[in-house]
């Protein structure tokens, strides 16, 4: 648990630095997302790519990363929501309800903020549409945290031995509680940083699990 907490703190610090560097979020998608797969892989060989862009009235955190495993394996880990508590320490409970046609509803109980004296726990339900092995669409259904949406995109690399993964996520953390709104209104960059740090942490967890022999 101590290692997980340290990883979260480091991810948040990284995210705050990234947000400060790119404070003016661009409309649409990060420019690097438009690169062809071969060019993107060359960049990802040197390290992960992150971006912050406008998704309507709020900002979307996006991370691109390379996994040394085939897309099918990475995809199965991403949609294994029952075990997300093992990937993300803030997830305390999950329930999955199949809806047919590769659609599921996923109820999460999470600690959205756990930083010093500020601790905010909540729950919400997402609609997840799966297109194996290339795409996952995430849409908000219900819950205290509003406007949760995102996606996963997977592209084969090195003849299918590796996977280029792009993950985008956004959420209105101010809607979690009046305390959260007050705190984040005073520090607006923190909301984006929390979303980005969560994306970085999940990317690291997915990669580590997929690359285990």
Image (cartoon, grey):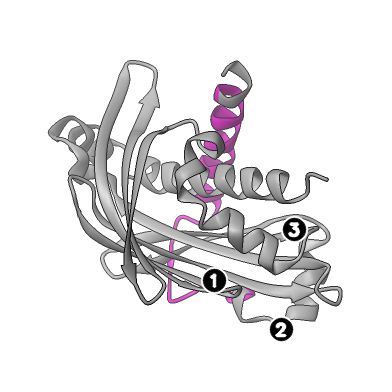
Vertical relation: 138 (above or below) 97: below
- Residue on which disc 2 sits: 36
Q: Residue 178, located in which quarter of the rendered image? A: top left
Alpha carbons under labels 2 and 3: distance apart: 17 Å
Query: Who is closer to the viewer here, 176 or 75?
Result: 75
User: x and y percent of residue 211 in the render?
Assistant: 78, 49
Alpha carbons under labels 1 and 2: distance apart: 13 Å
Query: Who is closer to the viewer here, 89 or 104?
Result: 104
Neighbour tally class for label 3: few under 14, some 14-19, many 20 plus, Cα within 10 Å? many
Q: Is residue 142 left or right of residue 5?
A: left
Whether residues under marks 2 and 3 lie with C-beta atoms below 8 angstroms apart, the answer is: no
Q: Residue at x 23, y 40 (%)?
A: 185
Q: Residue at x 58, y 37 (%)?
A: 11
Q: Which mark is residue 67?
A: 3
User: x and y percent of residue 152 in the render?
Assistant: 52, 66
Q: Secondary structure at mark 3?
A: strand
Q: Residue at x 27, y 29 (%)?
A: 120
Q: Secondary structure at mark 1?
A: loop
Neighbour tally class for label 1: few under 14, some 14-19, many 20 plus, Cα within 10 Å? many
Alpha carbons under labels 1 and 3: distance apart: 20 Å
The boundaries of the magenta stretch are 5-32
Q: Secondary structure at mark 2?
A: loop
- Residue on which disc 1 sits: 30
* Residue lying at the far left of the rendered structure: 178
Say whether residue 80 is magenta. Answer: no
User: x and y percent of residue 180 in the render?
Assistant: 23, 34
User: x and y percent of residue 23 in the render?
Assistant: 46, 55
């Amino acid at each position: 648990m101590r290692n997980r907490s340290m990883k979260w703190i480091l991810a948040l610090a990284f995210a705050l630095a990234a947000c400060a560097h790119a404070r003016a979020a661009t409309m649409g998608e990060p420019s690097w997302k438009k690169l062809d797969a071969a060019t993107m892989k060359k960049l990802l060989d040197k390290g992960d790519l992150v971006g912050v862009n406008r998704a309507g009235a709020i900002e979307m955190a996006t991370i691109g990363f390379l996994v040394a495993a085939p897309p099918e394996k990475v995809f199965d880990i991403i949609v294994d929501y029952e075990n997300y508590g093992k990937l993300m320490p803030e997830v305390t409970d999950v329930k999955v309800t199949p809806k047919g046609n590769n659609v599921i509803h996923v109820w999460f109980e999470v600690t959205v903020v756990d930083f010093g004296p500020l601790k905010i726990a909540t729950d919400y339900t997402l609609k997840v549409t799966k297109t194996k092995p290339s795409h996952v669409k995430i849409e908000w259904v219900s819950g205290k945290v509003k406007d949760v949406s995102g996606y996963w995109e997977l592209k084969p690399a090195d003849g299918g031995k590796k996977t280029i993964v792009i993950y985008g996520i956004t959420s209105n953390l101010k809607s979690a509680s009046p305390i959260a709104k007050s705190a984040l209104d005073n520090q607006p960059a923190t909301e984006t940083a929390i979303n980005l740090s969560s994306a970085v942490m999940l990317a690291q967890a997915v990669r580590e699990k997929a690359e285990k022999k």
